[in-house]
Image (spheres, grey):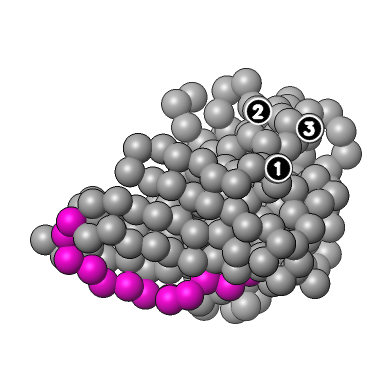
């Protein structure tokens, strides 16, 4: 596609429910990243995928968070048993390859998650 | 632990003014530094990427400089326009060379017509 696409753009859920956030990267980009942007704070790295390699999950804040990437393209970030502190904008980005380190990141518009 | 600071948090300038946004980082060992722009309700757009071996990068009216030894980068915007109004974020890549960028909290710029 023309850019990184994320859905939904907004998600309101009740505490304790599970949510799934979707990211469709730029066609041909092998690297995909998830970041979280909380109000008044900088972006926080969550996880990244490079091709078929095992993902780097070191930024996931708890075991309630998981992500998968099927077929080397679309990725889903799942948050189980959501808590109010999970409320944030979840941003997805892609790049040509994570092994090409001086490549720009291309971000989607994000999913605004609100946990009531 | 690497920390990235951007001062000021917000800035208003009249149209046409040249301006400088500042970014400082505590650990000079970085792989590269990127400047991003974020419009309200939108994702980030990469403006300029400076590799650790470089001193500056230019794109149109934008010029970014990097002084690793002092832990500073500046983004210079020439002849500012109302369309430049946005939040500007800088981010540093750790020397290990992974995409775990560390972001500043940004400078919110408003250019007044």
Q: In the rendered view, does A79 fall on the left or right side of B111?
A: right
Which element is circle 1 on? loop
Report the residue at 39% width, 62% height from top: B20
Q: With respect to residue B67, does B4 lie above or below?
A: below
List the residue tagged with mark 3: A99
Task: Say whether residue A74 is visible.
Answer: no
Query: Horizontal and vertical percent for residue B63?
Result: 43, 47
Which residues lie in the magenta part? B4-16
Indicate whether A3 appears above or below A7: above
Residue under the image location 33 percent in, 43 percent down: B61
Q: What residue appears at the point 87 percent right and 33 percent down from the top-left corner?
A: A53
- What residue would you read off at disc 2? A96
Mark 3 to mark 1 CA distance (whole Å) = 18 Å
Q: CA distance from mark 2 to mark 1?
A: 22 Å
The chain that hosts pointer 3 is A
Quarter of image, res A85: bottom right
Question: SS class of the residue under badge 2?
Answer: loop
SS assignment for the magenta stretch, majority? strand
Q: Nearer the viewer, residue B50 or B46?
A: B50
Which residue is farthest left? B113
């Amino acid at each position: 596609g023309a850019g990184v696409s994320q859905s939904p753009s907004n998600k309101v859920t009740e505490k304790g429910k599970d949510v799934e956030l979707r990211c469709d990267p730029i066609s041909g980009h092998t690297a995909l990243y998830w970041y979280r942007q909380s109000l008044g704070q900088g972006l926080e790295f969550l996880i990244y995928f490079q091709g078929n390699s095992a993902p780097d999950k070191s930024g996931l804040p708890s075991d309630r968070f998981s992500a998968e990437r099927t077929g080397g393209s679309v990725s889903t970030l799942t948050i189980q048993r959501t808590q109010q502190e999970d409320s944030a904008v979840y941003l997805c980005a892609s790049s040509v390859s994570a092994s090409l380190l001086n490549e720009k990141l291309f971000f989607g518009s994000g999913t605004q998650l609100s946990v009531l | 632990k690497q920390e990235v600071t951007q001062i000021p948090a917000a800035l208003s300038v009249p149209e046409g003014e040249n301006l400088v946004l500042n970014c400082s980082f505590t650990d000079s060992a970085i792989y590269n530094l990127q400047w991003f722009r974020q419009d309200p309700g939108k994702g980030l757009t990469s403006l300029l990427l400076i590799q650790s071996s470089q001193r500056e990068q230019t794109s149109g009216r934008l010029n970014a400089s990097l002084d690793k030894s002092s832990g500073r980068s500046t983004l210079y915007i020439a002849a500012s326009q109302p369309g430049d109004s946005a939040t500007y974020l800088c981010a540093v890549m750790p020397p290990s060379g992974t995409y775990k960028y560390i972001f500043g909290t940004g400078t919110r710029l408003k250019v007044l017509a």
